[in-house]
Image (cartoon, rainbow, N blue to C red):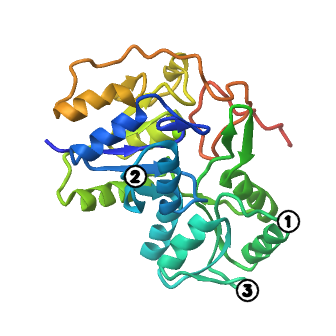
Amino acid sequence: MKTGYLIDMDGVIYRENNLIPGAADFVQALLATGTPFLFLTNNSAPTPEDLAVRLKHLGIHGLSGRHFYTSALNTADFLSETDPACTVFVIGEGGILAALHERKIANDGIHPGYVVVGEGGTTSEKLTKAHECIERGARLLATNPDNWCPVSSEKTRPGAGSTAAFLEASSGRRAYYLGKPNGYMFHRARRKLADLALIQLENVVMIGDTMETDIRGAFESGLQSFLVMTGSTQLEHVGDYVYQPTRVLQSVADLTDEIRMGKPSDRLNSPALGDRSFNSERHGNRHQTDILSFHKPRPRPAMTK
Ligand SMILES: [Mg+2]
């Protein structure tokens, strides 16, 4: 039975600029055994080649652009499948610009079919232009729902979700959020993984550190999911969610042996320890799509009538 892996990056392979212990061995085991895998990230700023270089500098060798599937690629796949002749006005960086260019989707600052919001590239001038395009009828599409993204243990930056929320407020239109946990991200990633493996995969497993995106999206797409304790989730919060991971692991290092041996460990759960949650003191929802994060209830709006 062939298993393929979709692997989140931040909080699974590295945190800040440090590799998670055992992550390099885990990736080498995947490569050495010919196990199909794809890194799956909501960050739409880098290109797949940028990410391969980033991991090389962190000490993971042997990767190329084909090992990555970003929310920028997912957005380009979405538009080329649903509206291939469309035009777009983009707020974002190299990853989304290159992905749209590759799919021959043209930029249009006058009368675009869509305003596409990605990570970064936000200026008041661009926001104003995007707002005007939406008023003229453009539909609003965000590469991912992340309101903020970690930069270091003490620093975050605004994400595509917060830029899209700005335009939702100014235009009165709702954005459509691609990227995890949207099922289209998992659907296209699974298809790409099967193409890469040259066979139909019987099992696809998502490995991630975030309940609202990695685990929720995998569950809703019918995939198995392994939650690791090296990122944003603390073990005591897992029970707050209505969807649950298939397995809880201390880190990806727990999988290295079973990938090398080719058969699942009989150990169902690793002793997951952890009080290392990133920014656990933050208030508010991390993603625009967080409607099921019960431990951080959304404040009830004031009555107006
Ligand atoms: Mg993560």
| Residue 134 placement (x, y as % from top left) | 73, 73
Query: Residue flagged by tag 1: what amino acid is it?
Result: Ser
The local crowd at label 2, few if under 14, some if 14 to 19, many if 20 or more residues have their Cα within 10 Å, is many
The disc, 3 or 2, on the residue closer to the chain's N-terminal end is: 3
Residue 226 to residue 85: above or below? above
* Picture residue at 73% right of the left edge, 57% below the top: 163
Marks 3 and 2 sit apart, C-alpha to C-alpha, by: 33 Å
Q: Where 54 sits versus 302, above or below?
A: below
Q: In this rendered view, identify the residue nearer to me: 99 or 173.
A: 99
SS at badge 3: loop
Q: Residue at x 45, y 76 (%)?
A: 80
N-terminal-most mark, 3 or 1:
3
The mark lying in front, picked from 3 and 1, is 1
Q: Tag 2: residue type? A: Phe
Q: Residue beneath label 1, please?
A: 124
Q: Which residue is mark 2?
A: 186
Mark carried by residue 110: 3
Disc 2 to disc 1, C-alpha distance = 33 Å
Do callouts 3 and 1 mark residues in contact (Cβ within 8 Å)?
no
